[in-house]
Amino acid sequence: MTTPAPSSRLCLRTKMVLLGDSGTGKSALAQVFHSEGASFPKVHMLNTTPELLVKTVAIPDTDASVELFVTDLPGLEPFLDVTKRHAHGASAFLLVFDSTNKDSFSGIGKWLKVAKTLRESEPLIGCLVATKCDLTKRRAVPAQQAQDVARSLDLEYFECSAATNFEVDSIFYYIANATYEAYEEHIKGLVGDSAS
Ligand SMILES: Nc1nc2c(ncn2[C@@H]2O[C@H](COP(=O)(O)OP(=O)(O)OP(=O)(O)O)[C@@H](O)[C@H]2O)c(=O)[nH]1
Ligand SMILES: [Mg+2]
């Protein structure tokens, strides 16, 4: 599913953004996905500017692929304006919190507000993502609590670890599949409109 699909009949493009407090592991998540597990940044290289990583995901059982423009954004407060500016126009978002840090979970409300300004009209695809799930002894946010919040916000919920490459791909595959499904729905709507 990760293989680029140069022969795809259809290639969709989508911009997705990673939002969350500084140090939650947004860059690690993006880089592990992009490098297929080869590159896990052990050091916190604090983002002051956005970083763009592009990767194509083939949609199973179809002739289509989705090119994900993964926009990794700064989480630190002084760079909030930079983050908001570069997030604008995205069709999908990840709200990222650190499962060992309660404050980062409390910060999700702030990032949700940013997510709600990404696009005026079109529906957004969104996920709540718990990172650093390899650090089980330091777990501070119970999975059930996070799952309940995700359900109440109508977001898909994922638990992952960039350090062990656990469930990293699943998050991005979900976004790619949901993008493809939204496209299919849109096309069906257009065909339906023109037939009536
Ligand atoms: N154990 C563990 N450490 C992680 C994981 N993901 C990230 N980290 C560590 O957490 C620290 C911060 O990760 P970053 O990805 O730089 O955090 P960020 O959210 O991009 O931070 P900003 O760019 O400042 O917004 C780094 O030291 C990473 O190695 C993980 O899954 N497990
Ligand atoms: Mg970063």
Image (cartoon, helix red, strand yellow):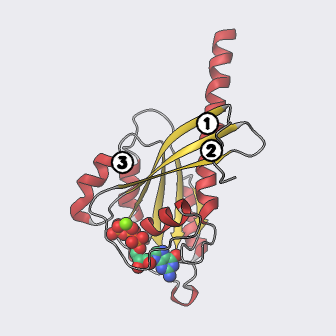
**Label of residue 87 in the image:** 3
Total numbered circles: 3
Q: The C terminus is located in which quarter?
A: top right
Q: Earlier in the sequence, mark 3 or mark 1?
A: 3
Pointer 2 residue = 178
Left/right placement of residue 14 relative to residue 177 reads left
Image coordinates of residue 154 in percent, x first then y, are: 57, 52
Q: Nearer the viewer, residue 9 or 173?
A: 9
- Under mark 1, the amino acid is Ala
Image coordinates of residue 66 in percent, x first then y, are: 59, 42
The correct choice, above or below, for 190 with respect to 37 in the image is: above
Q: Spatial distance from mark 3 to mark 1, Cα to Cα?
A: 20 Å
Dot 3 alpha-carbon crowd within 10 angstroms: few under 14, some 14 to 19, many 20 or more: many
Image coordinates of residue 22 in percent, x first then y, are: 34, 70
* SS state under label 3: helix
Q: Spatial distance from mark 3 to mark 2, Cα to Cα?
A: 19 Å
Q: In percent of the image, x 68 and y 24: which residue is there?
A: 188
Q: In percent of the image, x 54 and y 56: which residue is there?
A: 127
- Under mark 3, the amino acid is Ala
**Label of residue 74 in the image:** none
* SS state under label 2: helix
The correct choice, above or below, for 66 with respect to 101 in the image is: above
**Label of residue 182 in the image:** 1
Dot 2 alpha-carbon crowd within 10 angstroms: few under 14, some 14 to 19, many 20 or more: some
- Under mark 2, the amino acid is Ala
Q: In percent of the image, x 40 and y 38: which residue is there?
A: 119
Q: In percent of the image, x 46 and y 69: which residue is there?
A: 28
- Looking at this rendering, what residue extends furthest in the front direction? 6
The reply to whether the C-beta atoms of the residues labelled 1 and 2 are less than 8 Å apart is: yes
